[in-house]
Image (tube, rainbow, N blue to C red):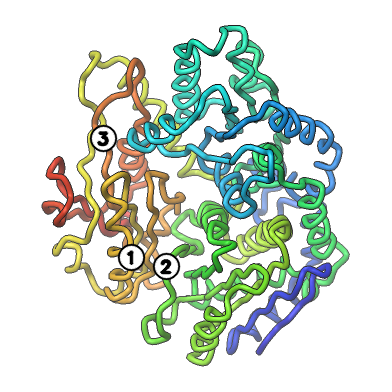
């Protein structure tokens, strides 16, 4: 059965769910009887919990109002963008992690810089080689840094800030009184970062709504400031978001609500075992699945439940997949004729397929809002709070402890070393039957060239969902979902290569090394490991590490 809905002239979204369509229709009818849509806009926490005072629900639904509420901020945001253009900037660099960096990266890669505006760049990697490569490519005199953190205490963000503050201090062309003019802070009101911005006389301090979580913050200043600096038409962007918000409004019947219809499909397919949402994007939207990956994984992946997003895995023939996939196509304009053919083949083989075609890049705001509504609604079906982040918060706390320990260590001491490599050692192929997911990272600089070889090989191993991330950015927290699928089996393969050298003058972030391991222990999860020499072509400076299988301990 094909379900097709038009949204505000933005083009159709199409759900072809086959034998699963009936369950989705029953869910939508149940939501109509419960007034789900109206209660969502009333910000009713009991959609997800029996306790209306549950933290991180009632105070995390401000994203519903953003397409309208951000209109009052447009003049200030556009004024900042005009100052960047007038100053002749070459680069606007976001210093942040996770929700503070993913939307800016999507906007930068999808729109590109408008004529006369700086290019948008993002630093969310603590890998020394990645940091050094970016730093070497910048003309500091023509660069602004957008220092972004909701809490204002993110370890990685502060490390990045101090690095570039010190580099500007060392640049003879930058007078001390002018140093702060190269920085813009985006944070919640009253945070340590806000205080730092005032003390160091940043060019601007832009406060974000405190009732919006990081992964729902694309249409807050966390996303809009970097987008505006590169010349994106923010009025048009928010207009697209408003049209989708109206279509998803509280008075719309769930069957006619594009966000709730998608959410019902995500949730019901997950209950039916089709919990791997596999994205296929055309070139113009190639970065969008990275944002969706975090939204879905961190919103639904907790307490051993959730939806597993698969971003960047090349589409294979129908026989390459088991019955755990839901395929989602994201297409821009007329792109994707060959993608349509592959999706048709998957649909004929019985796989559920969704297709969303954006008429213009500004429609990203529309799709972001649709998916936010959908993921929030799907959380109620899966049985999780989509707005809290227990594993993310735990990792942050453990990272802070690790940094304090590193700071107390003797200068020059080697700490936080985790050997790494990129490839699939033989031991990794002898993995247990029935695994549902493999997730990995191939890290810069030398490991990146192995990433394209690694990914196509993964689906052949018991047809798991293969996740991979070139670069040192961590995969989104899945809250134990990596190790517990519907059949109780799942694997998370991680390929890491962390430089053991501490940062000059300050210990580098340990968030990519010790805290995840400690977090697994705290959550009573364990992993199987295999160590073998790195594959041919890799420098012999460390072993190849494969961690396979994260499971809850009995």
| Above or below, comparing residue 444 to residue 272 in the picture | above
| Residue 297 placement (x, y as % from top left) | 50, 56
Give coordinates of residue 508: x percent, y percent: 35, 26
Between 371 and 317, the one nearer to me in the picture: 317
Kindly state the secondary structure of the residue where label 3 is placed: loop
For disc 1, the marked residue is 455
Q: Quadrant of residue 422?
A: bottom left
- Residue assigned mark 2: 313
Q: Position of residue 407 (x, y in %)?
A: 33, 17
Reading the image, the residue beneath label 3 is 499
Q: Is residue 278 above or below residue 202?
A: below
Q: Earlier in the sequence, mark 1 or mark 3?
A: 1
Q: CA distance from mark 1 to mark 3?
A: 23 Å
- Residue 377 visible in this rendered orientation of the protein: yes
SS of the residue at dot 1? helix
Q: Is residue 366 left or right of residue 106?
A: right
Q: Name the residue located 80 percent from the left edge and 31 percent from the top edge.
A: 76
Vertical arrangement, residue 332 with respect to residue 147, above or below: below
Residue ID at (56%, 35%):
94
Which of the two residues, 76 or 548, is positioned nearer the viewer here? 76
Which of the two discs, 3 and 2, labels the residue nearer the N terminus? 2
Could you tell me residue 197's position as x and y percent?
63, 18
Q: Residue at x 55, y 41 (%)?
A: 101
- Distance between the alpha carbons at the discs numbered 1 and 2: 7 Å
Mark 2 and mark 1 in contact (Cβ < 8 Å)?
Answer: yes
Is 527 left or right of 241, judged from the image as shown?
A: left
Decide which of tag 1 and tag 2 comes sooner along the chain.
Answer: 2
Element at badge 2?
Answer: loop
Q: Decide: marks 3, 2 in contact (CB < 8 A)? A: no
């Amino acid at each position: 059965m094909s379900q097709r809905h038009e949204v505000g002239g933005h083009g159709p979204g199409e759900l072809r769910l086959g034998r699963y369509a009936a369950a989705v229709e029953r869910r939508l009818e149940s939501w109509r009887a419960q007034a789900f849509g109206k209660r969502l806009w009333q910000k009713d926490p009991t959609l997800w919990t029996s306790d209306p005072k549950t933290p991180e629900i009632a105070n995390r639904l401000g994203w519903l109002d953003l397409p309208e509420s951000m209109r009052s901020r447009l003049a200030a945001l556009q004024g900042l963008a005009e100052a960047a253009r007038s100053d002749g900037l070459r680069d606007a660099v976001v210093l942040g992690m996770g929700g503070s960096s993913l939307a800016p990266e999507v906007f930068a890669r999808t729109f590109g810089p408008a004529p006369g505006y700086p290019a948008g760049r993002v630093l969310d990697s603590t890998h020394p080689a990645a940091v050094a490569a970016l730093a070497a490519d910048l003309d500091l005199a023509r660069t602004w840094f957008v220092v972004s953190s909701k809490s204002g205490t993110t370890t990685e963000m502060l490390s990045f800030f101090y690095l570039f503050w010190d580099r500007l201090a060392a640049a003879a062309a930058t007078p001390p009184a002018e140093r702060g003019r190269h920085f813009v802070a985006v944070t919640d009101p009253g945070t340590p970062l806000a205080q730092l911005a005032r003390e160091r006389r940043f060019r601007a301090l832009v406060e974000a709504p405190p009732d919006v979580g990081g992964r729902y913050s694309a249409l807050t200043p966390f996303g809009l400031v970097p987008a505006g600096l590169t010349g994106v038409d923010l009025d048009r962007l928010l207009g697209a978001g408003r049209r989708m918000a109206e279509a998803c409004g509280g008075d719309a019947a769930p069957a006619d609500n594009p966000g709730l219809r998608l959410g019902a499909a995500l949730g019901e397919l997950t209950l039916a075992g089709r919990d791997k949402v596999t994205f296929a994007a055309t070139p113009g939207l190639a970065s969008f699945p990275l944002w969706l990956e975090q939204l879905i994984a961190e919103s639904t992946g907790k307490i051993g439940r959730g939806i597993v997003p698969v971003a960047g895995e090349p589409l294979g023939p129908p026989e390459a997949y088991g019955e755990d996939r839901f395929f989602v196509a994201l297409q821009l304009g007329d792109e994707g004729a060959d993608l349509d053919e592959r999706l048709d083949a998957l649909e004929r083989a019985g796989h559920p397929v969704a297709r969303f075609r954006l008429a213009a890049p500004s429609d990203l705001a529309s799709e972001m809002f649709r998916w936010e509504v959908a993921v929030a609604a799907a959380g109620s079906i899966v049985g999780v709070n989509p707005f809290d982040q227990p594993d993310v918060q735990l990792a942050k706390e453990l990272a802070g402890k690790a940094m304090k320990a590193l700071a107390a260590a003797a200068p020059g001491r080697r700490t936080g070393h985790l050997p790494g490599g990129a490839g699939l050692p033989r031991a990794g192929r002898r993995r247990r039957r029935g695994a549902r997911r493999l997730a990995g990272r191939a890290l810069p600089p030398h490991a990146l060239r192995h990433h394209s070889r690694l990914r196509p090989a993964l689906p052949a191993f018991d047809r798991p969902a293969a996740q991979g991330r070139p670069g040192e950015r961590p995969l989104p927290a899945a809250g134990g979902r990596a190790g517990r699928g519907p059949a109780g089996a799942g694997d998370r393969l991680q390929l890491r290569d962390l430089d053991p050298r501490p940062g000059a003058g300050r210990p580098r972030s340990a968030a990519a090394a010790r805290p995840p391991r400690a977090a697994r222990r705290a959550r009573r999860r364990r992993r199987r490991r295999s160590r073998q020499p790195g594959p041919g072509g890799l420098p012999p400076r460390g072993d190849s590490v494969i961690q396979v299988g994260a499971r809850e301990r009995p």
